[in-house]
Each structure stands twice: as structure tokens, then as C-alpha cells.
Image (spheres, rainbow, N blue to C red):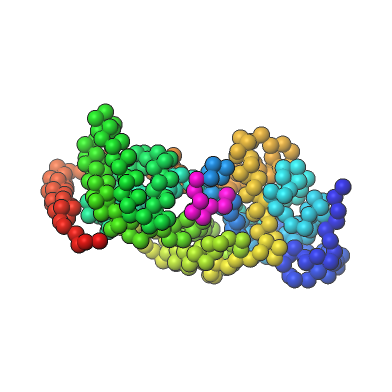
Amino acid sequence: MSRKFPVNAPCPCGSGKKYKKCHGSARTAEKTPLLRTPETFGEDCIAYTDESGNSGSHLFDKDQPEFWTGTLVTPPDFEKIAAPVVAECLSIVGQKELHGNALGLSGIDNIGDKLGYLFGGTGAQFLFTKIDKLHFAGAKFADTLLDSGTNNAMSLVQYGPPATRLPLALQLIQLLKKDDLVRWWKAFEGNDAEEFSKMMEAPLKRLETFEKNNVYDPRTVQLLRDALTWAIAHPKRVLEGGFSPLDTPNVVAVTLVVNMLHNFHEETGARVVTFIHDEQNQFIKHIKFMHSHSKQFQLDTSNICAPLPCVRGALTFGCDLESSPSDKRVGLQLIDTVLWLVRRFLKLKGEVDGAARRLAIYVVATGKITTFDRPTMIKQAESVCQQLYARPLTEEQMRKGRKLMREFEENRVARMNTAVEDE
């Protein structure tokens, strides 16, 4: 039997007042704004972000292979509108806060239709990110090894343009097995140059096998062999100080969220005037740091041959990122619940019933998911290759291009063979 929401508990709207003095009073309830018909957001919105699948630098937990974030984007008066709905839901399920893990499917089923009405009536939007942790480790290895700033066997021609960097990075990652990734991450975290050098011997041998079996073309083999061989000889130089707290899925995820919010701003014109992250995160300082930088600009990578992306200013955010406990923000409780439900729904391949199913289908159908995994990288690499092959080139352009490539290659080889200072 469910119990009523405690009248002396803090109101879920975050006002700081007791529930009976705030949205629990009949007088206040009568003045609570009605849910509105979905419409454009207008000029302002609020974004709430929560995460699931605790990660940090722990990438190899077999029970949590993915790291997720969920972001709820709402009109600025959402807390006022949602508070009485949430209070009613809490009374139904007999909880003091809404949390997906505590509610489970049965609890969400009891309130799913009420939440669906709330989200639909306010025009709430959902943005999700999903990071495959093993792929994250591989991508960080590729980014470290192929960095022309630290690996003299690479040049900006290979490391800069998406048309060359993405296919090369993908083919490098495909040389790695889980044991290689575990050894790499241990060396990376510990800034262990000797272990870093040793772990690269396995993918180098695998590359030789690929070459014998004609799996990779000769140019790919040449570039990857040069990069691995040079890094094995100069691991400290390539490792460049090792791990930073910024090198975690938690921090990378916020850059993906920010980019999705930039896109949301372009689509709707709405600016984020409040951006709230659940405070139960040891990396919140670094997440705030990353947001403070990435909120100011948007990268345009549409030119697949540009050595550097085009950077343009962004007006998406009129605020800094703030952290808050979930008991102070109804929006955080709601995105926690929805994120748990969506993950469960996808894991069970849609085998969810009742109001929980209706809510999950609504969120998945209307929301957007940005994935960071190998299938996504393969699609990106295929896309840039298709764009590259589709470009019409004259014979004169081809002649000039070959000449430039010879010059670039001569410079790369000369730099690779130049002695470096003792490390």
C-alpha cells in the first residue's frame, strides 16, 4: 500500500518550503499553471543532465560496459508546473524522491502515464549520449598515437583532416584486442612509458599479419607501422604526461551534450539559461571546466579535407553549468527516472509492458541519442570516404595534389628520422 508524500518534507519543487506550505496546500494547487499544448520553447530553456553507468577511468567493468547521460530540456517554468505532478507520483509510489533504480519497472508503470502527460504537455525534449567504454579506450589510444604534435612519424596531413584521420584511426583501433586496451589504459593512467612501449608490440605484429593477408592497403600499413615503431622507441614523448581527469567518459559526455544543445539552439532558437548537472559526481569540477570552454563555440567539421575544423561562436548558453542535489530539482529526478527506463527498455529490446512501455516508446521516439562506439565510427569513416571519392577532380588538380603529397611525405619521413633529444 502506498503512502502519501510526507507533508512536512521539503516540497519537490525545490522552493525550500515544506510541502504542506507550498504545492501541498489547496490554495497553491489551485494556482499551479495548467499543462500547455506543445509549442516552441521561445527564447529560454532549462537543461537537466544526469548520468548512469558510473565510469571515471574504470572502463573495464563487465557489468557496466556503457556510460550513459540523459538530458531533459524544458521551458523555464517547468519546476513550478512539474512539482505537483511529481508530488502526486511520489504519493502513489510511496517514495520521497523519484529515482528509476528504486522505482523499477513496476513503480514507473504506476506513474508512467502521468509523466508522459507532463512531458507531452510541456513540450519537454530528451537528449541522450551513450559511450562504449572499450571503444573509448581505443579511441584515446588512437588519438595519442596519431597525434602529429607528439609522434614524429605523423604529420598534420594524416592527423588533421577527417578524411584521413578517421579511416586511419579506425584501422588502428581494429588492431587492438581487449587485453591490449587493458594494458594501454594501465600505462596511460600510470604514465608508464615502458609498459606503453611494450603493449604496442602486439598490435604491430598484428599489423604485419594483416599486411601478409592483404587486409590493409600498403599505405595504411606503412603509416601505422611508422607510427607504432616510432612510439615504441619514444614512448615518453608520445605519452606526454599520461592520464588527466579530463580523459574520462564523464567529461567527454558533457562535450557531446553541449554539442547536442548547440544543435537544439540552432533548430529552435532557445537559449539555455540554466544548465544543471546532478552533483553526485567526483568529476564535476572537470565537467564544469569542459563546459565553460565548449559552450562558447561550435565546431564545423563539414569540410572533410580541412586540417583543422572551422570554429564559430555560439550563443546557446546564457549560464555556467551548476550542480545540484536531486532533492532540490524535480527535473533531475525526472531525467534520472527516464534515463533508467530508456536503458532498461533498450536492454530488454522493448519487452516492457503497460504505462512504462508507453512512456519509454514516447521518449525513445521523440528523443535523440548520440553514440560514441565503433559502429558509429565506421559510419563516419565510410561517410568521409564516400564524400572524398565523390569529389570531381581535374587532371591538373590531381597533378598538383600528387606533387604536394610527395613534398609532405618527404617532410614526414625526414622528421621521423631526425634524432630527438634525450628523454
Please give left or right for residue 62 compared with residue 233 in the image: right
**Closest to the observer, 420 or 312:** 420
How many numbered discs? 0
Q: Quadrant of residue 167?
A: top left
58 in magenta: yes
State whether residue 334 appears in this view.
Answer: yes
Q: Residue at x 66, y 45 (%)?
A: 341
What residue lies at 42% left-to-right and 51% top-to-bottom? Answer: 186
Q: Nearer the viewer, residue 43 or 68?
A: 68
Query: For the C terminus, which image quadrant?
Result: bottom left
Tell me which secondary structure the magenta stretch mostly adopts: loop
- Between 230 and 73, which is closer to the camera in this rendering? 230
Across and down, in percent, residue 95 comes to 78, 54
Pick whichever, 412 or 311, lies toward us. 412
Left-right relation of 256 to 13: left
The quarter of the displayed image where residue 28 is located:
bottom right
Magenta residues (range): 53-60
Where residue 27 sits in the image (x, y, percent)? 85, 68
